[in-house]
Amino acid sequence: QVQLVESGGGSVQAGGSLRLSCAASGFPVASYRMAWFRQAPGQEREGVASINSGGGTAYYADSVKGRFTISRDNAKSAMYLQMNNLKPEDTGMYYCAASPRGWFPSLGSGDYNYWGQGTQVTVSS
């Protein structure tokens, strides 16, 4: 049974930091690319950051470059998103996703087969 479980969300003030975690199971995690997406109320889901299966290549949305860092620990079947200097526009539900085409990262939601239930991030000004 495939499971992606996000944790680490919460409420912070602008300029603060949060670290999201995604625990994966039920599939060969080490051979899958993974990503973080977010969705604000009334807006489309957008790709925030993606990392390839080996962890050596990452893509970021322009809006988070220099502030967010994606990483993974295949030994623990886990992925992380370190979010620094958070802004109110970072508010939204953050989702973990996984795709079997592991060689290259992708920020396209259509490229992902498995999704978590999400964790809420709220940034106040």
Image: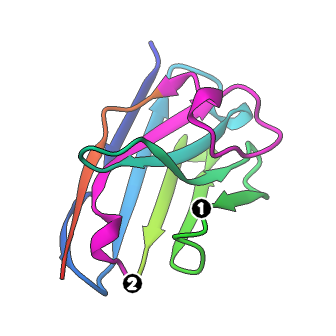
The answer to whether 102 appears left or right of 4 in the picture is right
| In the depicted structure, whether residue 108 falls above or below residue 120 | above
Residue drawn 70% across and 25% down?
100
User: Callout 1: few (<14), some (14-19), or many (20+) C-alpha neighbours within 10 Å?
Assistant: some
| Amino acid carrying mark 1 in the image | Ala
Bounds of the magenta segment: 85-114
Residue situated in front as seen by the camera: 28 or 118: 118
The answer to if 33 sits in the magenta stretch is no
Residue drawn 59% across and 60% down?
71
The answer to if 88 sits in the magenta stretch is yes
Residue drawn 33% across and 77% down?
87
The answer to whether 64 appears left or right of 107 in the picture is left
Position of the C terminus, as image quadrant, is bottom left
Q: Position of residue 22 (x, y in %)?
A: 43, 45
| In the depicted structure, whether residue 6 falls above or below residue 63 | above
Residue 3 location, quadrant: top left
**Foreground disc of the pair 2, 1:** 1
Identify the colour scheme used.
rainbow
Q: Position of residue 79 (x, y in %)?
A: 52, 50
Tag 1 residue: 61
Residue drawn 27% across and 47% down?
119
| Amino acid carrying mark 2 in the image | Asn
Tag 2 residue: 85
